Amino acid sequence: MKNTSELTDFYYKTLYPTLQELEEDRKHLRHRIVVIGAIYTLIVGLIAFALSSFIAQSPDILIFIGVGYIGLGAIIYKFLIKDYTKEFKQNIIKPLIEAIDDKLSYNCNHHVTEHLFRRSDLFSPPDRMSGNDYVRGNIDGTKIEFSDIHAEKRQKNSKGRDSWSTIFQGLFIVAEFNKNFHGKTLVLPDTAQSTFGNLIGNWLQSNNFSRDELVKMDDNNFEKEFVVYSSDQIEARYILSHALMKKLLLFKNKSEHPVYISFIGNHIHMAVYYDKDLFEPSVFRSLLEYKIAMEYVKTLHLAISIVDELKLNQKLWSKK
Amino acid sequence: MSTGLIVLIVVVLVLILMYNSLVAKKNQVENIFASVDTVLKKRYDLIPNLVATVSKYMDHEKSLLTEVTKLRAEANKPNISDEHKIALDAKISSALGSIMIAVENYPDLKANKNVMHLQGTLNELEEQLSAARRAYNQAVTDYNNAIEMIPTNFMASAMAYKRKQVFEIVERERKNVNVKELFN
């Protein structure tokens, strides 16, 4: 498997002609968006002006126009960038994934199933789930799949209207684990201990009734970053060996985002909370910018490298 | 209701809570030790098979094999204390480790199907044992903390609870086991 610097090379060398074409498209597109955006704003402004006598009577209409303006604007924007996004994913993201490992297949419309998301038990069950950029394959005999996920929950606001709040948005990875186990073990970011300190934080964690038993791990650095809940004290430690704890800590530091991990049904589920849609082409910044390129490369590499980094391919005797 | 009565009720409640938490901690230790014991037994059961297989090849390590057999016999005696079991486990672990290193010196033995299978099973059991030991140590640490820290230490001394011993984690276990090397 290629490392990140080799991939950056691949991005700038092999993909360079495609990037240049896309860069031209992007400039045209940006121009179009600015022009259409200006005309659209002008029209809405004129409508608002024409309705000014109504607005004076009931200012509520202004809110209505504002919401309509943003909503319709978003739809127009999505429509405008649709072709460009498709081009970008087919010509940049797909080759990048194949360059990392040619046994992986990519589909820009699908996502990890809701069944797997629910099975992971990391977040409360969603009422609506969307996602894209689905990758699946077999690395060194270990099955892995991941995608961008956006899970939301329906809430009623004070006026009785539906509003959606995000449960999780980011990268969701599912892979076979190299040991057999029966119970359920969850590794979550340690918010209580870092907010309230050791004593109160620990007490809060051990009294979390929505989760299983608290498992205190014998690795101080790991314990500072994560909190572990499990249905079985011994199995949690069977899964989380000293070596794996170190590797998960490294993974967390590398991802630079909150990481949620669960071990259920002989699989490892990892959710990296980016709070944004990943692998989308940049419209207002150049695709050739190093920072933009690195984000695509790093995120893909992070997901695919878990098999190697967590040594999921080194199966224990009983799994062979 | 008089204040005196309220204070009395609160004191009794606190005492009950302290008592219950101590009993829960003691039971947790016993509970997990039972699991440790199960894995230990599984490992003892492997020893006769292992000794029988390797003794045909090993000439220089006869003393090692008799020692392991002796230790196993001792561990299988009924009514031995938990402390004794912990001590025996450390000895058996190191003896089995030495045998496995010695196996490396006999190419015929290394290629033997039965030995390879035993090695794999043993490796798996060591992983399980390591997990069980760590869980036990955590339960014992919680228990020891409770019987030494204020205010539960007063209750613990009244209940005649004593400190328990932890397993020493061998330095080897802290390192990543190179599975590839083991199987090649």
Image (cartoon, rainbow, N blue to C red):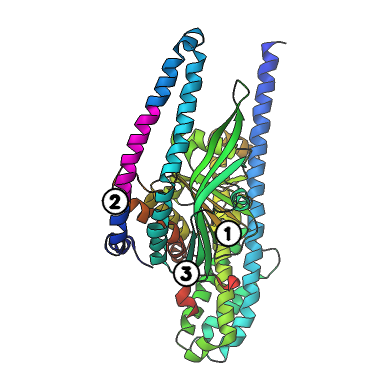
Answer whether labels 1 and 3 touch (C-beta < 8 Å).
no
Residue at the location (50% across, 11% down)? A54
- Looking at the picture, do discs 1 and 2 lie on one chain? yes
Q: Name the residue beneath numbered marker 1.
A: A267
Identify whether B166 is placed above or below B43.
Answer: above
Whole-number angstrom distance, CA of label 1 to CA of label 3? 20 Å
Residue A211 on image: x %, y %: 62, 42
Give the label, 1 or 2, closer to the camera: 2
Q: Name the residue beneath numbered marker 3.
A: A103
Residue A135 on image: x %, y %: 49, 59
In-front residue for pair A157/B154? A157
Identify whether B55 is placed above or below A22.
Answer: below
For badge 3, the amino acid type reads: Lys
| Magenta-drawn segment | A24-41
- Name the element at disc 3: loop
Identify whether A245 is placed above or below A151.
Answer: below
| Quadrant of the rendering where the N terminus of chain B is positioned | top right
In-front residue for pair A226/B125? A226
N-term mark: 1 or 3: 3
Whole-number angstrom distance, CA of label 1 to CA of label 2? 44 Å
In-front residue for pair B162/A101? A101
For badge 1, the amino acid type reads: His
Residue A240 on image: x %, y %: 52, 57
Q: Residues within 10 Å of mark 2 (few under 14, many from 20)?
A: few
In the drawing, what numbered circle is on residue A24?
A: 2
Residue at the location (51% across, 65% down)? A137
